[in-house]
Amino acid sequence: MIEFIDHLGIAVHSIEDNLPYYEKTLGLTCEAVEEVPSQKVKTAFFKIGQTYLELLEPTAPDSPVAKFLEKNGEGIHHIAFHTKDVPAALKRAADTGARLIHETPVPGAHGKQVAFLHPKSTHGVLTEFCMPAPKSGA
Ligand code: CO
């Protein structure tokens, strides 16, 4: 079950060049800058209630975000839904005809487990499910 919007991903050429807009114009605070090797991006987070804006800067030319920027320029890249059970959300999506980019969750930013649905099967919206990673040893 989807519980809330965890974050909106926004593709940018440079986090540094975007900071004045988010910090000065909007008055938000950048909580953390973190690299996510599994997606070849550097991320910056701004918290708004329980939802984040996640700026995504590619760290390699073959990063999916680099390809997005080439095609579309800077802008909204994906929407991420928080769920307690990503595998269940993936199964429901697959069973109802959505195409999965990830068959099983992969490590995302913020120590979360994430998985994406292909935008060709979601009416153009790249869609992410995410959940907190299980605590090790628990
Ligand atoms: Co995301």
Image: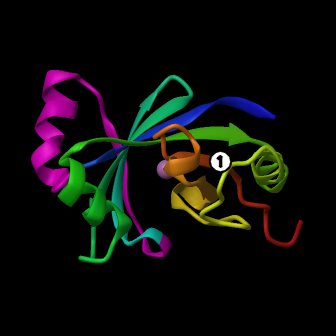
Q: In which quarter of the image is the C terminus?
A: bottom right
Q: Where is residue 12 in the image (x, y as percent from the top left)?
A: 22, 50
Would residue 5 appear left or right of 63 to someone viewing this image? right
- The residue type indicated by label 1 comes to Phe
The answer to if 56 sits in the magenta stretch is no
Q: Position of residue 102 (x, y in %)?
A: 64, 66
Magenta region: 12-38
Which residue is rendered at x = 79% and y = 70% of the image? 136
Q: Position of residue 121 (x, y in %)?
A: 58, 47
Q: Which residue is the site of mark 1? A: 129
Q: Is 132 drawn above or below residue 75 in the view shown?
A: below
The answer to if 29 sits in the magenta stretch is yes
Would residue 13 appear left or right of 62 to someone viewing this image? left
Which residue is rendered at x = 18% and y = 48% of the image? 73
Would residue 23 appear left or right of 91 to someone viewing this image? left
Q: In which quarter of the image is the N terminus?
A: top right
Classify mark 1: helix, strand or loop. strand
> As rendered, which of 112 and 118 lies closer to the eye?
118
How would you rate the neighbour count of disc 1 (Cα within 10 Å): few for under 14, some for 14-19, many for 20 or more?
many
Is the CB of mark 1 within 8 Å of ligand 1? no
Q: Is 107 drawn above or below residue 89 in the view shown?
A: below
Which residue is rendered at x = 14% and y = 52% of the image? 16
Would residue 11 appear left or right of 20 to someone viewing this image? right
Residue 47 is drawn in which quadrant? top left
